[in-house]
Structures are given as structure tokens and as C-alpha cells.
Image (tube, helix red, strand yellow):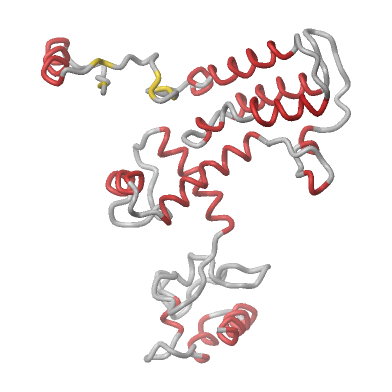
């Protein structure tokens, strides 16, 4: 166990706390569980160690004679796995991801030192899945987004975990992760919110009684070209729930309310949704 103290902490207070708890002080340059304890404004410098590890591995392999299949396995299983842990916690700088991919590309195409080699295919093409006829290398930026989106899903689906309870109490005590504000949170929290943007792009509600779904803000329509209501509220409040569109008993959709509040194409989609239920 260790503690970190701000620069404004008086030295006597610092020593007293350390002595009473019997713990060590964490310095800014140290790591915890393999990750930087503090991340300042220079994000690229904080994660430079990842690029250095990648470069060191590739330098060692250059002295060996590897087939192209062997190179592919090592790049995917070792090199592209190095930043995985950090990517599951933080949004790495785009420039750092580009630099790591540049090292991988040079190794893949056989470039040594300053000598130039032709790159016979664009990296974006090589990163396409093998099922589409390409190599299936990772696009590091997209992989980073996917790892952070996975954390968001944990905050949505696993409410019994310590991870959920900590972030819930600190950042969204009265709402869900989907409504949480960035505020004055840590870089880890801001990184998770980057993953939330990915989740929100593809998620939509499955309508039951509609008591939790906002008519004008959530994705709940099943039409491929229209996932949410785009028209402005007419007779309904902008915060109304989908349950408002049912009758007083809550079992049937109200055709009158739907026709009176939505554009014809939106009303048709809602009625079609109602017919499928």
C-alpha cells in the first residue's frame, strides 16, 4: 500500500501521515500495476514506455531469420498485445498509436534502419479481417476505443462489481453511466467517456412498457434509417417516456397520440413497431 501527496502538502504533515500509517510515498515517476500513477498534460510522455517496449522487441527480432508467417504471429501475439492493458484503462494519444504502427509497418515490410522499402498495401487495408481477404492486424486506435467501450458495458451490466460501485458513487450517483458528466474527473474517467461515445453510437432500446425510454433522446426505433425521433416535441414534453404513447392501461399503443405528435414517417415506424410486439 502507498500514498501520493500533492505538492501543497506540508513536509511535517506528510511525514506524520506516513509514520502513522506505515506506508511509502508514491513518486510521480513510479508505476502501479504496470501503469503510470499520474498522467499530466503530456500524455505522450506518460505512455512513451509502451513504444520503447515495442521498439526493444522488434530490435531483438531483427537479428533472427523469420518467415513471413512467423513475423505475422509475433506481431499479432506479442507486439500488438503490449499496449492492451493500458488501452483498457486509458485513451492513448493518437500520435503514439501512429508511431507504434509505424514501427510495426517497417518491420512487416522488411525496412532496416534508414533503408527504404516499398509498402505494397495501405495499413488500413491490412487491418481488415481475414474473412475479407486481408491480414487482420489491429487498428490500434479502434482497438483502444473498443477496450474502453468494454469498460462502459461493465458499468452498465455488472452492478455488483467494486469497479461499478466506485465509479457510481464518484461520478454518477443519481444516474447511469449514459447520463454521467465529465466534470473534473481523472484521465481514466475521461477515457471511459470516450468509450461511451462508441457504445451510444450502436445501442438502442428494446421497447417493453417504455417507462425507462425517453421519446426524444434515446434510440428506440427499429428502422435502419431512423433510430430515434428527429422531430421537435409538439404536444409532449421533451422528457416524456415512451410509455406516454400507450393507453391508460398501458397495454396498447394510442394511435391518436402517435398521429398528433409525430411526422407521418415517424408515426408509421412507431405503428409498425407496435404491430410487431
Tag count in the figure? 0
**Quadrant where the image shows the C terminus:** bottom right
**Residue found 36% across the figure and 16% down from its top:** 28
Q: Nearer the viewer, residue 54 or 250?
A: 54
Q: Is residue 267 left or right of residue 15?
A: right
Task: Find residue 229 and report its horizontal and vertical position in percent.
Answer: 55, 71
Query: Dividing the picture into quarters, in which one does residue 238 lie?
Result: bottom left
**Quadrant where the image shows the N terminus:** top left
Residue 237 to residue 74: above or below:
below
**Residue found 27% across the figure and 47% down from its top:** 169
Residue 182 to residue 203: above or below:
above
Residue 241 to residue 107: above or below:
below
Task: Find residue 19 and report its horizontal and vertical position in percent.
Answer: 13, 14
**Residue found 45% across the figure and 77% down from its top:** 242
Query: Dividing the picture into quarters, in which one does residue 8 lie?
Result: top left
Task: Find residue 260 and report its horizontal and vertical position in percent.
Answer: 52, 86
Q: Nearer the viewer, residue 241 or 249?
A: 249
Task: Find residue 91 and report its horizontal and vertical position in percent.
Answer: 52, 34
Q: Is residue 163 left or right of residue 5?
A: right
Q: Is residue 116 left or right of residue 253?
A: right
Q: Is residue 106 left or right of residue 198?
A: right
Q: Nearer the viewer, residue 148 or 162?
A: 162
**Residue found 30% across the figure and 17% down from its top:** 26
Residue 3 to residue 189: above or below:
above
Amino acid at each position: 500500500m502507498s500514498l501520493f501527496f500533492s505538492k501543497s502538502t506540508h513536509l511535517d504533515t506528510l511525514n506524520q501521515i506516513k509514520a502513522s500509517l506505515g506506508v511509502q510515498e508514491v513518486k510521480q515517476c513510479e508505476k502501479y500495476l504496470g501503469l503510470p500513477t499520474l498522467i499530466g498534460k503530456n500524455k505522450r510522455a506518460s505512455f512513451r514506455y509502451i513504444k520503447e517496449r515495442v521498439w526493444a522487441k522488434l530490435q531483438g527480432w531483427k537479428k533472427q531469420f523469420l518467415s513471413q508467417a512467423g513475423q505475422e504471429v509475433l506481431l499479432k501475439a506479442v507486439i500488438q498485445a503490449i499496449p492492451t492493458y493500458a488501452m483498457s484503462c486509458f485513451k492513448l494519444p493518437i500520435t503514439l498509436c501512429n508511431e507504434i504502427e509505424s514501427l510495426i509497418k517497417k518491420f512487416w515490410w522488411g525496412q532496416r534502419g534508414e533503408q527504404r522499402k516499398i509498402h505494397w498495401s495501405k495499413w488500413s487495408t491490412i487491418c481488415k479481417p481475414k474473412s475479407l481477404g486481408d491480414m487482420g492486424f489491429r487498428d490500434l486506435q479502434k482497438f483502444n476505443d473498443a477496450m474502453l467501450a468494454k469498460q462502459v458495458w461493465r458499468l452498465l451490466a455488472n452492478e455488483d462489481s467494486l469497479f461499478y460501485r466506485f465509479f457510481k458513487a464518484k461520478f454518477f450517483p443519481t444516474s447511469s453511466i449514459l447520463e454521467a458528466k465529465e466534470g473534473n474527473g481523472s484521465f481514466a474517467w475521461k477515457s471511459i467517456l470516450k468509450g461511451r461515445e462508441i457504445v451510444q453510437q450502436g445501442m438502442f432500446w428494446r421497447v417493453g412498457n417504455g417507462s425507462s425510454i425517453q421519446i426524444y433522446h434515446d434510440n428506440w426505433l427499429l428502422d435502419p434509417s431512423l433510430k430515434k425521433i428527429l422531430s421537435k416535441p409538439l404536444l409532449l414534453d421533451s422528457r416524456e417516456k415512451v410509455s406516454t404513447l400507450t393507453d391508460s392501461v398501458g397495454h396498447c399503443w394510442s394511435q391518436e397520440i402517435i398521429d398528433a405528435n409525430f411526422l407521418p414517417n415517424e408515426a408509421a415506424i412507431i405503428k409498425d413497431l407496435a404491430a410487431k410486439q
